[in-house]
Amino acid sequence: MSDATLIAQKRTETGSGVARRLRRAGRVPAVVYGLDAGTVSVTVPAHELDHILHSASGSNTLITLKGDDGDQLALARQIHRHPVRGTLIHVDFIRVRADQAIQAEVTITFTGEAEGVREGGILEQSLFTLTVEALPRDIPNAIEHDITPLVIGDSIHVSDLSVPSAVTIVTDPETAVAHISQPRVVEEEAPEGEEGEAAEGGEAAAESGEAPAASDESSE
């Protein structure tokens, strides 16, 4: 897991008006809690926090909050963004200890191209994150799985995924992750009206009792 540092300034004023002023000044209102310590209201630099959250480890980045009360290790949780602009509105930080295991959600990523996909099959993924438990510094950025050998009809379950020895998977091992399905075949339908017109032509000939006209060659 990557490490980062943020300067956390204590705040005593609350309210929507105060929060708007802080955000205009480039800071994000936040709270820090956990480890049987009290909840503290702080602000952190918006640009620096946004950069951390867009890194490879994202919200699982171990952050050192530097403040008046000393340094605290924390993880960003309950990240609130503006629904339209996507800017940070508020963040909760949970304190962690370097020697105490925590649970985190880690993204599942696939490497390679499945043989079944090359044959026309479709890779359908149903699980995108995995709950794992480990020391904060051992939380992986992602869980990778090579899908190259998979053929049509093959499936992947949580039990098939590999993680470092220091990491424990919490998600049920029987949970399906993905499978290679048969390609969907769409039957072509005759253009509307053609079949009906052919049938109507035959019926009309039968009702009139007329045989099909002979060709010029047969009459000669």
Image: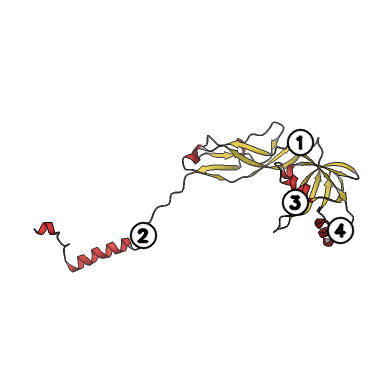
Considering only order in the chain, which callout, 3 or 4, is on the residue closer to the N terminus? 4
State the residue position of label 1.
137
Amino acid on which the number 4 mark rests in the picture: Thr
Q: CA distance from mark 2 to mark 3?
A: 54 Å
Which of marks 1 and 3 precedes in the sequence? 3
Query: Looking at the picture, how far across and down is residue 84, in whole percent?
Result: 69, 59
Quadrant position of residue 112: top right
Label 3 to label 1: alpha-carbon separation = 21 Å
User: Residue 89: x and y, percent?
Assistant: 77, 55
Mark 4 and mark 3: span between their CA atoms?
18 Å
Where, quadrant-wise, is the N terminus in this rendering?
top right
Sequence-first disc among 2 and 3: 3
- Asked where in the image residue 137 lies, by quadrant, the reply is top right
Residue located beneath label 2 in the image: 191
Asked if residue 19 can be seen in this view, the reply is yes
Provide the residue designation for mark 4: 14
Check disc 1 and give the amino acid type: Arg
Q: Is residue 38 left or right of residue 48?
A: right
At label 1, counting other C-alpha atoms closer than 10 Å, the crowd grade (few under 14, some 14-19, many 20 or more) is some
